[in-house]
Image (spheres, rainbow, N blue to C red):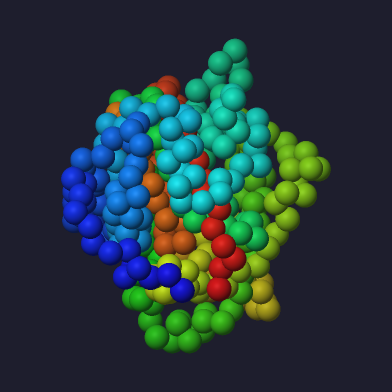
Amino acid sequence: MTTIADFPEVASSIHINAFQAALGAEVHGLDLSQPLSERDFSRIHRAHLDHHVLVFREQRITPQQQIDFSRRFGKLQVHVLRQFQLSGHPEILVVSNIKENGQPIGLGDAGHFWHSDLSYKELPSLGSLLHAQELPAEGGDTLFANMHLAWETLPDYLKRTVEGLTAEHSYVTKYAELQRRSPWRPNLTEQQIAEVKPVTHPVVRTHPETGRKALFISEHFTPRIVGLPEDESRELLDTLFAHSVKPEHIYRHQWQKHDLVFWDNRSLMHLAAGCPEQQRRKLYRTTIEGDAPF
């Protein structure tokens, strides 16, 4: 197992300032439009493991530069809603409430429920990077919940209850509900449905690089705990969800122009707080493939 200790301290112009929150840090002294040295990459990698969310301010990068930086961490995953890929860059999912010629240009309700990106895949996401293109004058915040803290602060009796259990993760858990709420969710084709067949993962996963345990369930993608009666499963999941998103576990990101935010899906859930319908919002997301949870 790789650990933080495998990334030695190195002299660097990069400064990492931790937030006064349950997670998160701001990165200074780095321009991602320029090639990133191995030394600086190691520093960023370590900081990502330490803080779970990194905020890079004023990153005036192209979509290809975002893709290239993301690929330093692993293979990129392509979202099942290919309708919302950025033209010429299938690795980028457009997250936007903007319509052109009456048609949505992106996924306008992304993040409506708490979730970890692509937890419904056999190999869920290692992390996601979201780059601000156009921001609303009000609203549009993103909330992050520290699932390591959620596990560590769970009452002992609940730890004993959930450790060793597995849960189903399904992309379509809330899909019909989201379709009723907004115009952003197209009907899925048979091929798309085949790409997102339900999978099972441990309720408590171990981070493959740090060894820390974290809860790995979400209201968006986790419909049930395997092997429990439906009512017991629902009650337990609701208890875990409520505990996970206590205020003391959360960092709320207020977006600034050209922010690039990089978070660890193995450690966190996130939620889009939403913005007024008439306020335009557009961001570009890349997603890095992780490994099978254990």
Whether residue 238 appears in this view of the structure is no
Q: Nearer the viewer, residue 96 or 224?
A: 96
Q: Nearer the viewer, residue 58 or 83?
A: 58
Whether residue 87 appears in this view of the structure is yes
Residue 127 locus on image (x, y percent):
46, 52
Residue 40 locus on image (x, y percent):
29, 49
Q: Is residue 221 left or right of residue 205?
A: right
Q: Residue at (73%, 55%) from the top-left corner?
A: 197
Q: Farthest top residue?
A: 101
Q: Nearer the viewer, residue 214 or 50?
A: 50
Q: Residue at (54%, 20%) from the top-left corner?
A: 99
Residue 105 locus on image (x, y percent):
56, 24
Labels in figure, total: 0
Query: Image quadrant of residue 258?
Result: top left
Q: Nearer the viewer, residue 224 or 51?
A: 51
Residue 152 locus on image (x, y percent):
36, 76
Establish if 147 lies above or below 229.
Answer: above
Establish if 52 lies above or below 239.
Answer: above
Q: Residue at (43%, 41%) from the top-left corner?
A: 69
Q: Residue at (57%, 62%) from the top-left corner?
A: 291
Q: Farthest right residue?
A: 190
Q: Is residue 96 left or right of residue 210?
A: right
| Quadrant (top left, top right, bottom left, bottom right) of the C terminus | bottom right
Query: Image quadrant of residue 29?
Result: top left
Q: Is residue 288 left or right of residue 250?
A: right
